[in-house]
Image: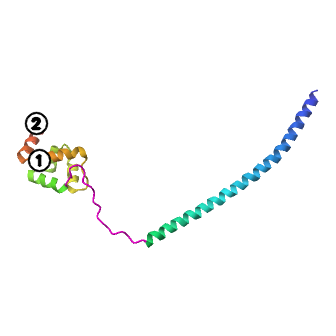
């Protein structure tokens, strides 16, 4: 009985390999066909992208350049003015370091604000407006108070 079982198993394996061979051949053909179609689509996509880039360059060259207008940034908060801060500091007779102490900021920040390179944050705008309302005596008194306290 064992030889019959072995013969039956080997025959079943042979028949299934034969069936699978035909199935696999069909799948391999379909797979290679799909790969070639994908490659063709990639080539077409690449050529279309290059045509789009070429068209964009042509359009940019053909269109006249817009007139250069100065970019005006909207004023933040209370309309910070760098020149007004520098003028107030000069009016009070303070150094940038003293002004920085009044504003509770660094001297570098005050320098950048006065030069107009940087706009102060909203938290600093309130302090700047408060200092701009101060007189010379009040500013010096506040600096003395900060130095002792």
Q: Is residue 128 above or below residue 66?
A: above
Residue 128: % across, % down: 17, 47
Q: Secondary structure at mark 1?
A: loop
Q: How many marks?
A: 2
Q: Which mark is residue 98?
A: none
Q: Earlier in the sequence, mark 1 or mark 2?
A: 1
Q: Residue furthest top?
A: 1
- Residue drawn at 13 percent across, 55 percent down: 87
Residue 121: % across, % down: 25, 47
Q: Quadrant of the N terminus?
A: top right
Q: Quadrant of residue 116?
A: bottom left
Q: Quadrant of residue 124?
A: top left
Query: Disc 1 marks which residue?
Result: 133
Residue 98: % across, % down: 14, 46
Mark 1–mark 2 Cα distance, whole angstroms, equals: 23 Å
Q: Which mark is residue 148?
A: 2
- Residue drawn at 21 percent across, 56 percent down: 115
Nearer mark to the viewer, of 1 and 2? 1
Q: What predominant SS class does the magenta segment belong to?
A: loop
Q: Secondary structure at mark 2?
A: helix
- The residue closer to the viewer here, 68 or 94, is 68
What range is drawn magenta here?
63-81
- The residue closer to the viewer here, 44 or 93, is 44
Q: Residues within 10 Å of mark 2 (few under 14, many from 20)?
A: few
């Amino acid at each position: 009985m064992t030889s019959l079982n072995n013969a039956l198993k080997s025959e079943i394996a042979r028949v299934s390999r034969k069936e699978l061979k035909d199935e696999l051949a069909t799948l391999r053909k379909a797979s290679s066909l799909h790969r070639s179609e994908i490659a063709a689509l990639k080539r077409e996509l690449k050529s279309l992208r290059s045509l789009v880039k070429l068209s964009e360059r042509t359009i940019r060259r053909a269109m006249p350049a817009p007139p250069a207008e100065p970019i005006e940034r909207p004023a933040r908060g209370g309309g910070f003015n760098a020149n007004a801060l520098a003028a107030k500091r000069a009016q009070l007779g303070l150094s940038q370091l003293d002004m920085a102490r009044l504003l509770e900021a660094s001297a570098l920040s005050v320098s950048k604000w006065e030069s107009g390179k940087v706009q102060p944050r909203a938290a600093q705008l309130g302090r700047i407006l408060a200092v701009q309302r101060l007189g010379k005596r009040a500013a010096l008194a506040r600096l003395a108070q900060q130095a002792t306290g």
